[in-house]
Image (cartoon, helix red, strand yellow):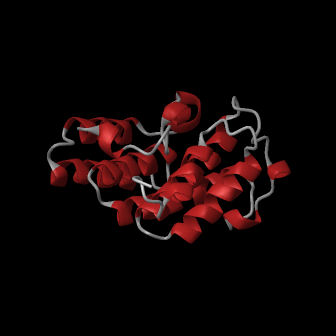
Amino acid sequence: MDTARHAPPQGGLDDALLAEALLGGGLPPAAEDHLRRAGLSYHLDAQAEDHLRQALALAPGHAAVLIGFYRFYFYKGRLPEALDMAKQCLAKAARENRLAANWQDVAADDAPFGRYDTLLPRFYLFSLKGYAYLQMRLGDLDEGRAAVTKLLQLDPTDKIGAKVLLDVLERVGQDDDG
């Protein structure tokens, strides 16, 4: 898998989000096995997706399963489906952090976003970053810009690298030869 060509800059929904403390907790062993098998059968789309669906049936709404689907769809270039999973991750992260359901209504003091060692707020930030990135890739630059702007409000020291996305937006439409 060529992740360098398709991976969102500096993260997306991965990094430390796969830490056992946040994502592995409460995951039934059978669901974990299906996630592992999905990874092993990544090159066989239907088989990998079937394992992801079985993991979802065993652990509905579990962050590890949602992120597994997000990554599968993302790296397969199925960006609209990856965006749907990013939205589901964002909704789950909002619930887990007791935040407003609409990301536009979340304020910097609603959670300890500035502390990089707090996994649940990081999950929210990375979910919003994935959402912003996919909006940009799918052509909704205004929505992507709004989400990146929100990320920088929530994380003003830019620990998750949202400024990279803002820089990309600033270059859109500029002539590289100019």
Residue in the foreground of this view, choosing between 73 and 11: 11
Identified at 26% across, 48% down, the residue is 51
Reply above or below: 39 against 47.
above
Q: How many marks?
A: 0
Q: Can I make out residue 110 in this image?
A: yes
Q: Position of residue 142 (x, y in %)?
A: 57, 70
Q: Which residue occupies the extreme right position in the image?
A: 109
Horizontal side of 111 relative to 162 (left or right) equals right
Quadrant holding the N terminus = top left
Q: Position of residue 133 (x, y in %)?
A: 49, 55
Residue in the foreground of this view, choosing between 149 and 16: 149
Reply above or below: 107 against 125.
below
Q: Position of residue 40 (x, y in %)?
A: 22, 35
Q: Which residue occupies the extreme front position in the image?
A: 178
Q: Position of residue 81 (x, y in %)?
A: 36, 63
Residue in the foreground of this view, choosing between 47 and 81: 81
Horizontal side of 131 relative to 157 (left or right) equals left
Residue in the foreground of this view, choosing between 115 and 144: 144
Identified at 47% across, 64% down, the residue is 173
Identified at 68% across, 57% down, the residue is 149
Q: Can I make out residue 95 in this image?
A: no
Quadrant holding the C terminus = bottom left
